[in-house]
Amino acid sequence: MKISHYTGVLFMLIFMNCSKKIPTPITPKIIPAPLSQTINNGIFNLNNSVALECEKEFIVVADYFTKYVQKAYNVTLKSAKSSTKIQLVKNKSIHNEEAYYLTITPTLISIEASSAKGAFYGVQSLLQLLPATSNSETIAIQCLAIKDAPQFAYRGMHLDVARHFFSVDFIKKYIDMLAMLKMNTFHWHLTEDQGWRIEIKKYPKLQEIAAFRKETLIGHYSDEPHQFDGKKYGGYYTQEEIKEVVKYASERQITIIPEIEMPGHSQAAIAAYPELGCTGDTIEVATKWGVFEDIYCPKEATFKFLEDVIDEVVELFPGKYIHIGGDEAPKERWKNCKHCQKLIKEKGLKDEYELQSYFITRMEKYINTKGKQIIGWDEILEGGLAPNATVMSWRGIKGAVEAAKEHHNVILTPGSHCYFDHYQATNENEPLAIGGYLPLEKVYSFNPIPEELTKEEAKYVLGAQGNVWTEYIDSPEKVEYMIFPRILALSEVLWSAPSNKNYDDFKNRVLSFFKRLDAMHIKYANHLYVISETITTTNDTLLLSLNSQTKGKVIRYTTDGSTPTTSSLLYASPLKINQNTIVKAISFDEDTPISAVFTKEVFKHKANNAQVSLSTPPHKSFDKGGKEALINGLQGSSKRYNDNEWLGFNTDSITITIDFNVPTEVSTISTRFHNGYGAWIYAPKELEISFDSGFKTKTTLNTSKDLIVPSKTTVPTQIVKQLKITVPTYGNIPDGKPGAGYRAWLFIDEIIIE
């Protein structure tokens, strides 16, 4: 009986030991990718028996890490000596203050850096080696060695809190999001036409009046007529709250650059203090988006006001920069202002653009006396650049090139690659955005060094920044959705070595990072599996190709209008379209749908196999699909105009010639025109169609306020080899409308001939 008892106890001990789950480490998939990474054998077990040691200079970083693992993983690090430990070590031989070495062995995690910045970034990489979530008492971490340093000194993200206001709690969360991706600058856009968001104690009306608007525009600016919600909206940050945020950011090695707009985008301030404007008239804080004519008047009272504002701002923000805007400042008020015209003559200035340069230069000199330097949008180049200014180039890269060649520091933030308020997918169900189209891959392809610069000139490029303008972003969740995962791509553009960049590998790491975002309750857009299409014509047959960005998944589709399921047809090759067809498709991971439903109606008509020519080419910004987009069988979006199918023209008229391969019967010609007044786009009033048979006809359009204006012309059946469609554009935009006096844009969609 004794032997049997001992055997049973031994069996139970062996069983209990074997049943314990041995922790396994996650595969390292750090974003942004480190400069060098070597995977070694073994694991480090993180648990309550691990000690944390650090040098005095790294106490703030150590405290950050301690609190993080306690909150996220319920691991309490020891301060006493232990056989397994984490060390933060100062290494003076590391010359880049943001560089770090991370070495992990079974008994030691060592982070070496020459400053707290480098140590903090080492901690961020270490945290990405931990699982997104864990209920285990012990967390396994893969043994490895990393040597890492950033490519660019300036790695920034912007947030506009003036169009829509965000709480201090969310600002802190935003800073946390930047910190985990090794971003080091937060550009805080604090003043605008639609609201003033920073407490200035000397001017209480900025808090009482400028911080609030009576209502807000509903829908898109291009929707007509404009409608408003009738609700007072606004808020501001007290100086104590700002100090709190600045301290929070500093602990995460992030510098905050405040932006105080001047001379434009200042309607809110003028609403509070009308004497700051040229007319002195009482105006309201702006309730809709756009550019407004009321800007600061360059008189002594205005400069005194701005200097007083700067006096309070510099005490709140310890960083070296103050952003003064300088963009989108209409000159109409200055042209009609006696004081401004007198000042132009007194100072020997050429025009209002040089007056803006005078304005910026004067404010720069004052800001310099406070030990700060200015940053401005690239408009500050107009009329001459202030001596010590840094240029933030947003209208493409031209401003960056010009400034760098003049030996001024530049920060790249072109709308083409860095505007995260733009649409990130072509799906019709994407949340409302200002416009544009900036997919993840395009962000990842960005090179902040313009090829026009020499190696010496390129040294003036400090880095780049993602911008988040919030006209159409009214909640924290939507901010997150718009920046993730595009901020992941930008972080890698700015930190990682170009030789380490690989988009397929990046996408794989993004998929893993989504689990981390889920754990952090961060909303994100998942378009990695989004389905897109290309279409070609072969022997009078349309071929529709379906494309998904991620390998190893399958696409299933239907052609009867139903939603695809796991039993639907498996996509293997381009679909042959011989009649009007609605194609729907979904990406699947085995039996799980992993994409939104792709829906595309394909129009099979008589011009699909024809040739098309244009009297005037489309504007280069609105020519994504080329002239063939007019007859390829696909219509553009019914919500926005900047996709692959709409073509945009800024000319007096356009003639479209369609040549058929053989004599063809034609009885109807249909198309659509975009009619977004807010974007300066107007449907034409009429069009003329002429045939090589000699027949001509005119069609008058119902130019309603609908966003899409259809046109259908029915004619007696013509047998032709050629037809021409001549479309006079609308003409100049009427008074009282956005863009009044300027020539209206013309946008035309698929031309369906039957």
Image (cartoon, rainbow, N blue to C red):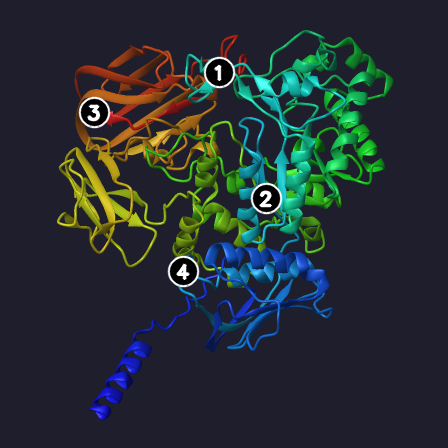
* Location of residue 251 in the rendering, given as x and y in whole percent from the top left corner: 65, 50
> Could you tell me which secondary element the residue under label 4 belongs to?
loop
- Callout 3 environment at 10 Å: few (<14), some (14 to 19), or many (20+)? some
Answer with mark 2 or mark 1, whichever residue precedes in sequence: 1
Answer yes or no: is residue 377 visible: no
- Alpha carbons under labels 2 and 3: distance apart: 55 Å
- Identify the mark at residue 528; answer none if there is no mark: none
Q: Earlier in the sequence, mark 3 or mark 1?
A: 1
Instruction: Name the mark nearer the viewer: 4 or 1.
Output: 4
Q: Are marks 2 and 1 in contact (CB under 8 Å)?
A: no
Real-space CA distance between mark 2 and mark 1, rounded to the nearest whole angstrom = 33 Å
Badges 3 and 4: C-beta atoms under 8 Å apart? Answer: no
Task: Give coordinates of residue 174: x percent, y percent.
Answer: 54, 42
Q: Which residue is mark 3?
A: 720
Q: What label does residue 231 carry, if any?
A: 1
Amino acid type shown at disc 1: Lys
Q: Residue at x 32, y 21 (%)?
A: 725
Q: Which mark is residue 465?
A: 2
- Image quadrant in which the N terminus is located: bottom left
Q: Nearer the viewer, residue 627 or 172?
A: 172
Q: Which residue is mark 4?
A: 134
Q: Earlier in the sequence, mark 3 or mark 4?
A: 4
